[in-house]
Structure formats: C-alpha cells, structure tokens
Amino acid sequence: MHLINKLETKMSSRGVTLTLIMITLFLSTASGDSPDKCVYTIYIKTGSLMKAGTDSKISLSLGDFSGSSVWVPDLESWGLMSPYHDYFERGNLDVFSVRGRCMDGPVCRLSLTCDGSGAHPGWYCDHVELAATGPDTGCSKSMFYVQQWLSSDVPPFELTVSVDACNPWNINAVADEQEKCGKFVVVNPARYE
C-alpha cells in the first residue's frame, strides 16, 4: 500500500509540473509573443501602358542577404486602400501593410508572381517600394524598379519576375546612404539585356 501512495504522489507532482508547463506555453502564446513582429509597408506602382492592369492574384516574396524571406501568397488581402478599391489597375499606386518575421538585414531581393487568372491576366509592374520596421531592427527602405510585364502573352512571356541585389557584385544595386534608413535602389537587369 505504501508503494501505491508513493506512485500516486509522484504522478500527481508530474501532473502539476506538466500543467504548469502547459499554462506557461499558453500564456506566452496568448501574450502576443509571435515571430511575426516586423511590418513591411509596400507600395506597388502599376504601369500606365495600355492593358497594364490585372484582375489576377499577385503574390510577393521578399528576402535579405542572409537568405531570410517573407512570402505573401495573396497581396491584395493585405491592402490598405478603401474596401471597394480595384488593386493593380493601370496607373495605380497601391499600398499594403504586411506583418511577417523580421529579417537579418535590409530587403534586397524581390520576387513577384501573377497567377494569370481573371479577365485581364497580364500585368505591367513599374516599381515596388517598401519600408520595413520592427522591434530592435531599426528601419530599412528598398526600391525595386521592375519595369516588366508579368504575362504569358507579352514578352518576356513570364508570370514571375525576380529582382535581386543581395549579390554584393550586382552593379545594378545602389545603396543610398543619404537616406535615414539606408535605402536600396535596384533595377531589373533583365530589362537591359
């Protein structure tokens, strides 16, 4: 009988310990201790060319020198424009605010994808400008001159474009140290080939 009492005491102390661990984990999650602490404010300018606008779904990926990245599968769902705003239309400057994991350095890589759906599937992106900020990370600004169609029926016949200045030998990347946040200006090298 004495052995059974000892086992019950050990089991109940383990149960209490397990319960305390579970409560701690729950409270740390509920308190907002999330890895998605950085805010990326993104400005996307659609070109003014005829039929430059699109009804397709646009996704975006951002990256830094260390290989960290943030992927946004449906950019429009993060839009800050009015509820009835038509995103990615000819001449528009659309604004988005994305919350995601903080990166180790400034954003130097951009990838945009147009899914080619809808009545007007092609899209001409002129440029993307973004500001990133978060706790203990400071701020950074990046400007990507895309200047390319994302379309299956207009050259270069691609639905994805990547503009990468993470390679330190990329002569198209210019860091503007005059800006308070150290702005990167990046052109699409494929545009000039």
Image (cartoon, grey):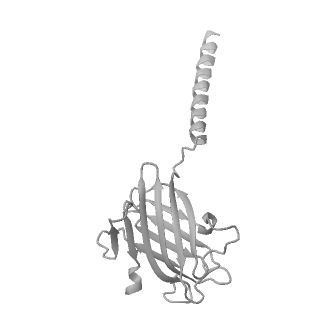
Q: Quadrant of the C terminus?
A: bottom left
Q: Is residue 51 left or right of residue 68?
A: right
Q: Residue at x 36, y 63 (%)?
A: 182
Question: What count of labels does the image hold?
Answer: 0
Q: Residue at x 60, y 38 (%)?
A: 26
Which residue lies most toward the top here? 2
Q: Residue at x 54, y 47 (%)?
A: 34
Looking at this view, is 57 or 20 the one in front?
Answer: 57
Looking at this view, is 59 or 20 the one in front?
Answer: 59
Q: Is residue 12 left or right of residue 145?
A: right
The quarter of the displayed image where residue 91 is located: bottom right
Q: Quadrant of the N terminus?
A: top right
Which residue lies most toward the left here? 169
Give the image location of residue 69, x and y in percent.
46, 61
Q: Is residue 100 above or below residue 128?
A: above
The quarter of the displayed image where residue 93 is located: bottom right
